[in-house]
Image: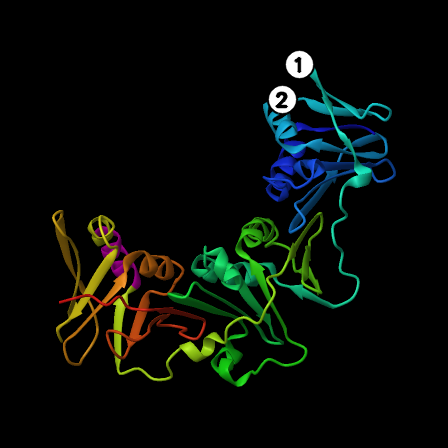
Amino acid sequence: MDIICNQSELNNAIQLVSKAVASRPTHPILANILVAADQGTNKISLTGFDLNLGIQTSFDGTVKNSGAITIPSKLLSEIVSKLPNETPVSLEVDEDSENILIKSDRGSFNIKGIPSDDYPNLPFVESGTSLNIDPSSFLKALKSTIFASSNDDSKQLLTGVNFTFKKNYLESASTDGHRLAVALIGNEEHSDDKDKFPLNEGDLSVTIPTRSLREIEKLVSLKTSENSIKLFYDKGQVVFISSNQIITTRTLEGTYPNYSQLIPDTFSKIFNFNTKQLVDALERIAVLADQQSSVVKIKLDNTDLASISADAQDIGNANELIPVSYTGENFDIAFNVRYLLEGLKVITSKNVLLKCNHATTPAIFVPEDNFNSFTYLVMPVQVRS
């Protein structure tokens, strides 16, 4: 293999695919990036694959000789990132010794590779389900829910986001057992009927690990100008394909919890806040809340102001009043402030509704202008008075 390419394009490709290189490889070749070149098309492709997540990207270069080699990811990344970006980079492989000569106009590096024959093939889905997905809709669904997934590996199914692709909309959901985020993205005329759409045989429901989604998010962010990205699914494997990139990931096996059952049908108390005012106040109160228990109390006493407070024993306390629209009896409720802030920050509407029944039963936050598009359920914290 003998190629010449642009330093920044090569560096960007290495940074992208290295996210899928195993940090603790079970086999030495899994610590490597596969570099392949095709003389016929002058395309250079790089692949990283840790057997769960695979990323492949390609770009144009000058290919003097076709071929493939695997190169230690960390070493290749450090060398190429430090080369001057205004000059071309060449890679030459000695087929007999697997030595790779990397040259720029300032100097050269000689490193040892591993033949590509043993590198695992990215799983390609030949049968199964194929969909065209709108990149901006998928990105919105992902960003609205990824934050609420679990970090606890013992709850493996909850360490991802569940996506349901229906005819008229996309639904995403994640929960860690303490809170639940559900986003509905699609035709607004259908969004009122979310409970009337049972899962049909043709609907695709997959749970994708959060770690993989962080990389898929980067790919999709770059492709929002494209009309669609191809999604293929078969036997526990999802493949996303755009013009010059492929990401493949295993899905999390099992049936995702029936989260719609967790959301109460009716609410006796509804409070209307200005979203920005609520977030700003919580950010300030969090300074004290984070010193100890992360608990913030919201007190409503039938006036047009809500009291938001935190009490850190032996350290101090904080209190702030913000406008609220509510009529009813006095009511106190407490939450983990971090849970509140993470959910409120994905709500883009001017006002947000807090709906609840009791201080100990699930509360939900929904955008006032399109409350079916996003639902954020949080379990209150019980505090001793």
Secondary structure of the residue carrying numbered label 2: loop
Main SS, magenta region, reads: helix
Magenta part of the chain: 275-284
Crowdedness of circle 1 by 10 Å Cα count: few (<14), some, many (20+)? Answer: few
Q: In the displayed structure, does residue 212 sit left or right of residue 122?
A: left
Decide if residue 104 is in sight here.
Answer: no
State the residue position of label 1. Answer: 106
Secondary structure of the residue carrying numbered label 1: loop
Q: In the displayed structure, does residue 52 sit left or right of residue 344?
A: right
Q: Nearer the viewer, residue 315 or 56?
A: 315
Q: Nearer the viewer, residue 78 or 170?
A: 78
Decide if residue 49 is in sight here.
Answer: yes
The residue located at (66%, 36%) in the rendering is 31
Residue 195: percent from left, percent from top: 49, 83
Structural distance between the alpha carbons of marks 2 and 1: 8 Å
The image shows residue 12, relative to residue 181, as above or below, that is above
Residue 238: percent from left, percent from top: 67, 60
Identify the residue at the far top of this view: 107
Residue 254: percent from left, percent from top: 59, 68
Q: Give the residue type that dot 1 points to.
A: Arg
State the residue position of label 2. Answer: 83
Q: Give the residue type that dot 2 points to.
A: Leu
